[in-house]
Image: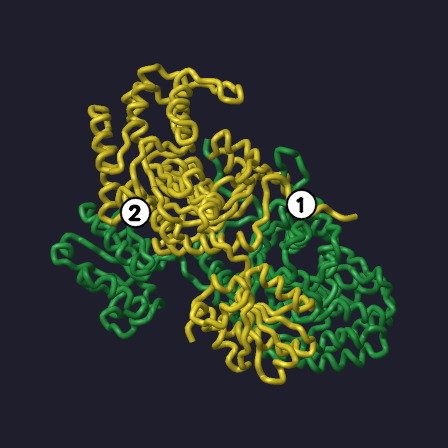
Chain colours: A green, B yellow
Amino acid sequence: MSIKPTLSRGLRDLLPEQMIARQRLIDTVRGVYENYGFSPLGTPAIEYLDVLSGSAGQEAQQSIFRVSNPEDEALGLRFDLTVPLSRVVSQYPNIPLPFRRYQVAQVWRADKPDPGRFRQFTQFDLDAVGAPCGRADVEILAAICDSLTAIEAGPFLVRFSSRKVLNLLLKRAGIAEHLAGDVFRVLDKIGKIGIGKVKLELSAGYTDASGDPIRGVGLAEEQVSIIEEFLAIKNKSRGDVLQRLASFLAGIDGSSEELAVMEDISGNLDALGYHSDQVNIDVSIARGLAYYTGPVFEAVLLDAPQFGSVFGGGRYDGLVARFGGPEIPATGASMGVDRLLAALEHIGKAGQVKTAAEVLVTVMDPGLSRECMLVAFDLRRAGIRTEVDVSGGRLGKQLKRADKLGIPYAILLGSSEAERGVLTVKQMAVAREHGAGIEENAAWKSARFGQQEVPRAEIVDVLRQLLGRGS
Amino acid sequence: MSIKPTLSRGLRDLLPEQMIARQRLIDTVRGVYENYGFSPLGTPAIEYLDVLSGSAGQEAQQSIFRVSNPEDEALGLRFDLTVPLSRVVSQYPNIPLPFRRYQVAQVWRADKPDPGRFRQFTQFDLDAVGAPCGRADVEILAAICDSLTAIEAGPFLVRFSSRKVLNLLLKRAGIAEHLAGDVFRVLDKIGKIGIGKVKLELSAGYTDASGDPIRGVGLAEEQVSIIEEFLAIKNKSRGDVLQRLASFLAGIDGSSEELAVMEDISGNLDALGYHSDQVNIDVSIARGLAYYTGPVFEAVLLDAPQFGSVFGGGRYDGLVARFGGPEIPATGASMGVDRLLAALEHIGKAGQVKTAAEVLVTVMDPGLSRECMLVAFDLRRAGIRTEVDVSGGRLGKQLKRADKLGIPYAILLGSSEAERGVLTVKQMAVAREHGAGIEENAAWKSARFGQQEVPRAEIVDVLRQLLGRGS
């Protein structure tokens, strides 16, 4: 009986052309995070359900994949990396704080799958636990900028605000504290639904395009007006936004302390070279999650804003204490690896490499099989990523496959070459996109598959040169 | 209500000191595999249960973690990476064959947890699908050797045999084909239980130390004798083993063809520089899994043989066809990352680094906080992995943490240093194990925490030198 080779909905495979781009991205960002002195952490995919759901909002709880073990415990797959981090910090009191860790791993959410939205996706988190508000938040913002610069994502904008500033807004508008979560949740949608619908949802609600009623938060008209006035505080300069915020919040208890925190972050960013064109203050940023307590961050690619935030995060001073220990201040950000790759692909910056191989040594004569392997191993030992044919198929098929995969060079060894002590090097169609030294060589440009004979003893040097590795 | 921060049995966290060694290992082996022209593949953790269990032996089936999704489908967590690879090759007929892929990923088995045996572990697989027996098997053996050499695992021995040779043994001994699986399963235990118990289990069975009856396969005495004679074929030279095998199997139908295959593999290995001291033929190797059809491999570290095979694999020409397509020949090997790391740790070769950071810029005067950040960012921009204190705690505590984590250098900036335009560089206890240029500098050796003042403008150069990065 044959089994259908297929995946459950919302799950997908990542074929080499996708994985190569993904690994390059992850390796680059890992380099940035380690440069900041952050270290890797690994946690298992399976956590106790109470660890997951006790820390999750209601929406996250419903989307947890349940897992069963032989002991019939209540288990689930992690839906983010922040909850496992909080558990780890609570579980191992000997971890020296601040705990500066990064983690890149799969997370699972059993949401309704949409195009481009999957039930397994990769998060790449950077957090400092045991770090009160200040330098740590500046570092997270700077690391986001450095990551987006390092991966050459094109122009980007990191935006930040603070839950504490939003709390001051609530005070200023006379909105009861228990409504804070609802108000922030609605504000978080402003990028998607616009100010008009945000206002409606903050007051009496409305009926959406598909006829579904959207329940309102029930704020009074004057309260909504004050929020609208707040949301209008925008400028290309952080300094200007801070000045306008100061006058908007003037006289509100605690506002000067909170604004001093924002000013300190902004001043540090300027001193370190991260100016308003890279990192701006955007007071509309609320971030959906309930656990944020201070500065909140997000980042968009300016060439692909429709993909939304490719980084998101903020300060969560209360999360670790949910496991019964003391309150430990913490801040961090999460890179949405899948979303960022989709955005990079959209703007043609994800890379199109389909294989690790730079050279294929073909085998056309079984009697020369061993000599072909020797050529391949010589190239490998010189650091050239080399395949040798293992199909045993016809030469034409071997070359067609190399062309399809975009392997830049193929080496041919027939009895005629063997007699004369040479190899034929064939430049595949895509070779022009690879390495240096090709354009100068007119012989290579003459045909779709340019080719030339190379003495066996020179094959390593010739390929090193063709691939731009110097001599 | 507080939640208990703990993990379910058989699961574990990998703290930075474990993850850093693990990543180094994985990065190194990835480099080897890419050098061979293998490309990465990603598949989701969750697969349909029939995909998993249809391809698994009975033992593996029982250990699958079940997962439920909102659609109530029968799903499970993958227990290896070979089954998902076979599914992928069947599901995407456009993948050019041979498909040379590697995959490093978590797998899950709900087995009874033992010390050192976990329910989530990491496999690192290397496979060539669409590759008949021959060069591909040689490449897998060579890649295992190159990987163990690259990670500096000390002396190792890769051993191989062939299921086909075992089938010839069955013919020679007149053992019915339907008993093959049982016989191979028992042979696979020889390293653990020894020849005496293997003989008992092949014949009438026995009662083990804890009084449990071990059922026998029921072979006749003469059959067991022939197997014993076969198992005695051992030598330090592959050539000698092949010669003795030839006389043992003389006259058995098909034996000359199979021995020619083994001789070809052995000859290729010699030509490529992999001699009997690295790769030997061991006829007792059977590998437990039912799906192997040709050459089978395993590897042990000679300094840590008690950890068993750190690589295992073989040829599985029938696995892909289980999904209804044509038979596609395939071979590959899997590195047991957790077992290999445990073995390396045991012999002191796993590395003891606890943090990515090479330098901690302490902050003792809040008024100099920004200047401390600037120092940190200068170092980072010069490629030195640097932390700046984000704890806001006392200096003594900051230094104690740096020492505990093994950060080699700390930088101090107080008002006295600031006035004079200098920084104090403190060499932490562990610095002697890091980088070059330290031993020559007598000043550093004088104290547990040697320290010296460095002009602010020279801090990057001094640290580059201390860390052995040249100037």
In the figure, is residue B246 to the left or right of B463? left
Q: Which residue is mark 2?
A: A390
- The residue lying toward the viewer, choosing from A434 and B353, is B353
Residue density around tag 2, few if under 14, some if 14–19, many if 20 or more, within 10 Å: many
Residue density around tag 1, few if under 14, some if 14–19, many if 20 or more, within 10 Å: some
- The residue lying toward the viewer, choosing from A161 and A352, is A161
Question: Would you identify the image quadrant in which residue A430 lies?
Answer: bottom left
2 or 1: mark nearer the eye = 1
* Residue at 51% from the left image edge and 69% from the top image edge: B446
Residue B98 makes an appearance in the image = no
Q: Which residue is mark 1?
A: B6
- The residue lying toward the viewer, choosing from B448 and A20, is B448
Q: Which amino acid is tagged 1?
A: Thr
Residue A248 image point, x, y percent: 80, 78
Residue B268 image point, x, y percent: 24, 45
Q: Which amino acid is tagged 2?
A: Val
Question: Would you identify the image quadrant in which residue B318 lies?
Answer: top left
Label 2 chain ID: A
**B24 shown above or below B117:** below
In the figure, is residue A79 to the left or right of B379? right
**B240 shown above or below A144:** above
Contact, mark 2 vs mark 1 (Cβ under 8 Å):
no
In the figure, is residue A325 to the left or right of B420? right
Secondary structure beneath label 1 = loop
Residue A54 image point, x, y percent: 73, 49
* Residue at 47% from the left image edge and 35% from the top image edge: B55
Disc 2 and disc 1 on one polypeptide chain: no
